[in-house]
C-alpha cells in the first residue's frame, strides 16, 4: 500500500537533502537538492521556453554517470549563477569528479521566470544568485520550508501565488519516492471559481486539509476544453521546475524515463501545461540504495506512476503553502474568506 512518507517531503528518500535561500526584497530564491553521495540523475524538458544548465550531460549516451547536486532557481537566466556557486563550494569540499587539480562537481540546474513579480531587480552587475546558491547549499537538511521559500519564493501560478511544494510516497516494499516542485505555471491549478484543485483526486490521507469540495464547474457544461487564456503572456515568463527522487538503483536511461513519467503529475495538477510560455523541466534522482529486482521495466513503471502522483500532490502543497506576495494572492486568501 502506497502512503505518504514520515515528513511527506522529498527528503523522506534516504540520502536526499534540500536547502532553501531567498531574498524577500528581490522576491526570489534558490533551492538546492543535495544527495549525500553522488546520485544517478536524468532529466526531461517539456516546456517551450526552458532555461537549464548541464542537462545534455545527463543524456544516457554521455560520459557523466552521476551528479552531485541539483539547483532550482528563480531569476530567469540570472538564476543559473546559483549553480556556479554550488559547484565551487562542493569542489572546495572535495566533492565532484576526481580530476586534476581539483574535484569537478556535476550540478545540473533549471530556472523559472520571476522577474515580473514586483521585487527589486535593480541589482546592476551583481545579481543575488551566487550568494543565494551558497546559502541554500549551506542550509541543506531533511526539513525545509514550503510555499514562499527557495525557488518558489516569488513564483506565480496562473492567477494565484505559486510556491515551493513537496510530497513523498512510501510504496510499502522498501521503495520511497518524493517530489519537490517550484510552481510558477502559466496554467491554472484550480478547476474554476469554486477553488477545486486539479490535484485534489490525488490527495493522500487528508494532506490538503479542508478544501472546497471537488466538483465539476458550476456552469453545468463540464470541464471546458478551451480554458480562458485572456491574461497577457510574455515569452519565457513562467515555468514549473522540480525534482523527483527515489532510493532505487537506476541507470541513466531509467532515470530519464522516471523524469518523463513524472511530468504526468504536472498535467494532472496544472492546466494547460508545457505551453510555449513555460520551460517546464523535471529532474529524476536515484540514490541507488535498493535494486529494482528481476523485472526492471515493471518495477520502473510502478515508480514512475507513483512519482507522477507525488508531483501532482507537490504542486498542490506549493500553492496551498504560499502566502500573498504583492499582487499575487494566496489560494487560502482567495478561497477561504
Image: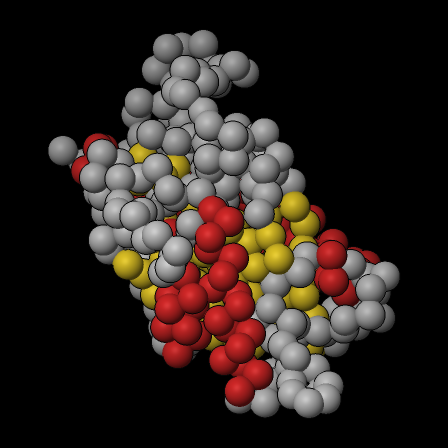
* 166 sits left or right of 179 in the view: left
Q: Residue at x 55, y 54 (%)?
A: 110
Q: Residue at x 26, y 36 (%)?
A: 328
* 130 sits left or right of 69 in the view: left
Q: Residue at x 82, y 70 (%)?
A: 63
x and y, in percent, of residue 227 in the image: 47, 18
x and y, in percent, of residue 151 in the image: 41, 55
Residue 280 visible in the shown view = yes
Q: Quadrant of the N terminus?
A: bottom right
The one nearer the camera, 96 or 265, is 96
Q: How is the image coloured?
A: secondary structure
Image quarter for residue 140? bottom left
Residue 269 visible in the shown view = no
x and y, in percent, of residue 318 in the image: 37, 50
Which residue extends farthest front? 125
> Total of numbered circles in the picture?
0
Q: Quadrant of the C terminus?
A: top left
Please determine whether, in this image, residue 198 is positioned above or below residue 283: above
x and y, in percent, of residue 331 in the image: 27, 38
Image quarter for residue 68? bottom right
Please determine whether, in this image, residue 88 is positioned above or below residue 115: below
* 208 sits left or right of 278 in the view: left
Please determine whether, in this image, residue 58 is positioned above or below residue 117: below
The one nearer the camera, 198 or 2, is 198
* 56 sits left or right of 86 in the view: right
The one nearer the camera, 316 or 129, is 129
Q: Residue at x 34, y 15 (%)?
A: 218
Amino acid at each position: 500500500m502506497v502512503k505518504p512518507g514520515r515528513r511527506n517531503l522529498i527528503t523522506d528518500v534516504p540520502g536526499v537533502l534540500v536547502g532553501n535561500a531567498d531574498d524577500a526584497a528581490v522576491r526570489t530564491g534558490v533551492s538546492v537538492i543535495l544527495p549525500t553521495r553522488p546520485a544517478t540523475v536524468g532529466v526531461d524538458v517539456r516546456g517551450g521556453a526552458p532555461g537549464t544548465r548541464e542537462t545534455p550531460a545527463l543524456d544516457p549516451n554521455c560520459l557523466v554517470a552521476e551528479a552531485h547536486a541539483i539547483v532550482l532557481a528563480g531569476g530567469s537566466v540570472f538564476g543559473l549563477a546559483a549553480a556556479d556557486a554550488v559547484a565551487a563550494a562542493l569542489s572546495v569540499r572535495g566533492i565532484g569528479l576526481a580530476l586534476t587539480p581539483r574535484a569537478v562537481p556535476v550540478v545540473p540546474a533549471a530556472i523559472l521566470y520571476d522577474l515580473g513579480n514586483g521585487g527589486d531587480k535593480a541589482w546592476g552587475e551583481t545579481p543575488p544568485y551566487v550568494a543565494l546558491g551558497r546559502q541554500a547549499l549551506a542550509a541543506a537538511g531533511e526539513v525545509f520550508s514550503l510555499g514562499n521559500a527557495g525557488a518558489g519564493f516569488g513564483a506565480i501560478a496562473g492567477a494565484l501565488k505559486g510556491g515551493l511544494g513537496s510530497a513523498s510516497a512510501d510504496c510499502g516494499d522498501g521503495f520511497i519516492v518524493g517530489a519537490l516542485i517550484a510552481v510558477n505555471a502559466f496554467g491554472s491549478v484550480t478547476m474554476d471559481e469554486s477553488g477545486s484543485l486539479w490535484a485534489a483526486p490525488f490527495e493522500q490521507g487528508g494532506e490538503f486539509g479542508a478544501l472546497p469540495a471537488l466538483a465539476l464547474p458550476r456552469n453545468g457544461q463540464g470541464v471546458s476544453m478551451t480554458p480562458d487564456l485572456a491574461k497577457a503572456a510574455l515569452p519565457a515568463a513562467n515555468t514549473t521546475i522540480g525534482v523527483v527522487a527515489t532510493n532505487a538503483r537506476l541507470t541513466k536511461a531509467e532515470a530519464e524515463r522516471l523524469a518523463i513519467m513524472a511530468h504526468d503529475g504536472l498535467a494532472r495538477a496544472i492546466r494547460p501545461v508545457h505551453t510555449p510560455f513555460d520551460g517546464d523541466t523535471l529532474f529524476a534522482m536515484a540514490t541507488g540504495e535498493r535494486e529494482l529486482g528481476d523485472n526492471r521495466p515493471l518495477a520502473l513503471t510502478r515508480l514512475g506512476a507513483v512519482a507522477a502522483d507525488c508531483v501532482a500532490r507537490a504542486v498542490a502543497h506549493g500553492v496551498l503553502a504560499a502566502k500573498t506576495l504583492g499582487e499575487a494572492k494566496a489560494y487560502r486568501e482567495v478561497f477561504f474568506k
